[in-house]
Image (spheres, grey):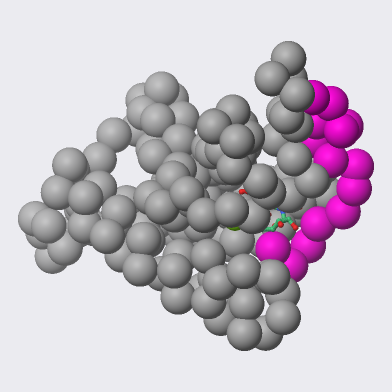
Amino acid sequence: MGGLAESLLVLFIYIAPAMVANGTPVILHGPPPIDFGKRMPDGRRVFGDGKTWGGLLAGITAGTFVGIVEWPFLGAVHIAFASLASVGALCGDLFGSFLKRRVGLERGAEAPVLDQLGFYIFALIFLYIAGISFSIYAELIWAIIIYALHRLTNWAAYMLGLKSVPW
Ligand code: CTP
Ligand code: MG
């Protein structure tokens, strides 16, 4: 195997922990809110009640666990990269909420692209800072897949009653 197929697989191995880290808080979360209810000078919440310490810790733990599962194939150092990608994913999610609050969007309001790809872009940036980079074609193809997957899984979570909105 070579070329694009291999690049897509390599990126998947590195980004799977971030995908799991991003999805886990929908199911596992709990107070207190990360911003502890604090507001910015604009009068709006820093992140809002949709971002909790329980969700953050559950996401990082679950993403790191994916690294442990992948460890026999990639070596123990991958556990560190899985943690890093997970932290990046959740920072991206927080950054998205921070931006949404600043432009006046309430918790749960839709921000197209930011909601679906913020975590992915941040995970890629965190890995890049640690010296891991990927084929730009693989990054773009995964961006499209993740966008579609995010829409689908959030709709499913809504249908299952896990979320109050389908995005
Ligand atoms: N969640 C959490 N802690 C996090 C991330 C997510 O508890 N760090 C939980 C919350 O219950 C949240 C749900 O996962 O409602 C879905 O996440 P998301 O769609 O990102 O949050 P929203 O409620 O839409 O809030 P926001 O508008 O800030 O994105
Ligand atoms: Mg949302």
Where 137 sits versus 155, above or below? above
Q: Which residues are magenta?
A: 26-39
The residue depicted at 62 percent of the width and 69 percent of the height is: 165
The tally of labels here is 0
Asked whether residue 28 is drawn in magenta, I would say: yes
Where 125 sits versus 154, above or below? above
Where 16 sits versus 131, above or below? below
The residue depicted at 25 percent of the width and 40 percent of the height is: 134
The residue depicted at 73 percent of the width and 29 percent of the height is: 44
Give whichever of 63, 91 is nearer the camera.
91
Q: Where ligand 2 lies, by image quadrant?
A: bottom right
Q: Is residue 91 visible?
A: no
Asked whether residue 91 is drawn in magenta, I would say: no
In this rendering, position of residue 28 left or right of residue 167: right
Give whichever of 134, 100 is nearer the camera.
100
| Quarter of the figure with the N terminus | bottom left
Where 106 sits versus 161, above or below? above
> Quadrant of the rendered structure where residue 29 is?
bottom right
Residue at the limit of the structure toward the left, as seen here? 3
Residue 136 at what x, y percent from top left?
17, 42
Residue 6 at what x, y percent from top left?
19, 58
Q: Is residue 97 visible?
A: yes
Residue 2 at what x, y percent from top left?
10, 59
In this rendering, position of residue 106 left or right of residue 128: right
The residue depicted at 49 percent of the width and 44 percent of the height is: 119
Residue 65 at what x, y percent from top left?
65, 56
- Majority secondary structure in the magenta region: loop
In this rendering, position of residue 126 left or right of residue 64: left
Give whichever of 92, 36 is nearer the camera.
36
